[in-house]
Image (cartoon, helix red, strand yellow):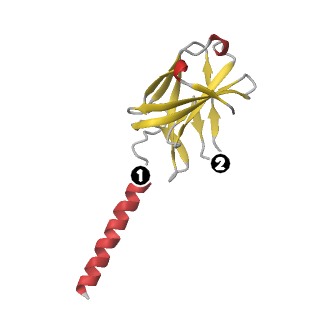
């Protein structure tokens, strides 16, 4: 009987440790002061006049790119990044499911697929561009426009 209680205690402790690791926000930073940046270079001049905006999501959905995010998944307010030159820097955000909020992200992940969306001045998606095998290091990554492929939105 003592062996059974001891075994049950070890299983319970292992479960608690495992669930706490799953629930961890994986060092996503916090607030608007920390986190990485996705930098896109070589943006065509047709999008750099200040009337276009950009955002991105990564697949499998670990990273998001917005100028700012307030709120959670259901009630969030997402601010796109205005494009004013051939280089655009998008702050990297991650979603913390435990707190239902977005936080600046500084994680490292290899081989992410980045789905960049370009919006017109009315926030209507104008272009959907896909970049494969993007490597994020401490939340930062650099991609060249020429390395992406246009896709339908």
Image height of 97 relative to 126, above or below: below
Looking at the image, the residue that sits furthest to the bottom is 1
In the displayed orientation, state which residue is furthest to the left. 2
Residue at 63 percent of width and 42 percent of height: 76
Residue 139 higher or lower than 84, as above or below: below
Residue 23: image location, x then y, percent: 44, 55
Q: Name the residue at 36% across, 61% down.
A: 18
Q: In which quarter of the image is residue 119?
A: top right
Secondary element under disc 1, as helix, strand or loop, is loop
Regarding mark 2 in the picture, which secondary structure is present there? loop
What is the number of the mark on residue 74? 2
Q: Where is residue 88 in the image (x, y as percent from the top left)?
A: 54, 19
**Viewer can see residue 33:** no
Give the quadrant of residue 85. top right
Q: Residues within 10 Å of mark 2 (few under 14, many from 20)?
A: few
* Label placed on residue 24: 1
Q: Residue 137 carries which label?
A: none
Q: Can the viewer see residue 75?
A: yes
């Amino acid at each position: 009987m003592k062996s059974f209680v001891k075994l049950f205690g070890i299983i319970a402790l292992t479960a608690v440790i495992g669930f706490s690791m799953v629930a961890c926000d994986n060092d996503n930073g916090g607030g608007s002061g920390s986190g990485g940046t996705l930098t896109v270079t070589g943006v065509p001049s047709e999008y750099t006049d200040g009337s276009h905006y950009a955002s991105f999501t990564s697949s499998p959905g670990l990273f998001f790119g917005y100028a700012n995010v307030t709120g959670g998944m259901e009630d969030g307010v997402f601010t796109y990044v205005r494009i004013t030159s051939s280089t655009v820097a998008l702050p990297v955000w991650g979603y913390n499911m435990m707190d239902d909020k977005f936080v600046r992200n500084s994680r490292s992940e290899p081989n992410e697929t980045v789905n960049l969306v370009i919006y017109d001045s009315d926030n209507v998606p104008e272009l959907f561009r896909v970049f494969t095998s993007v490597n994020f290091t401490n939340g930062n990554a650099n991609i060249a426009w020429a390395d992406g492929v246009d896709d339908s939105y």
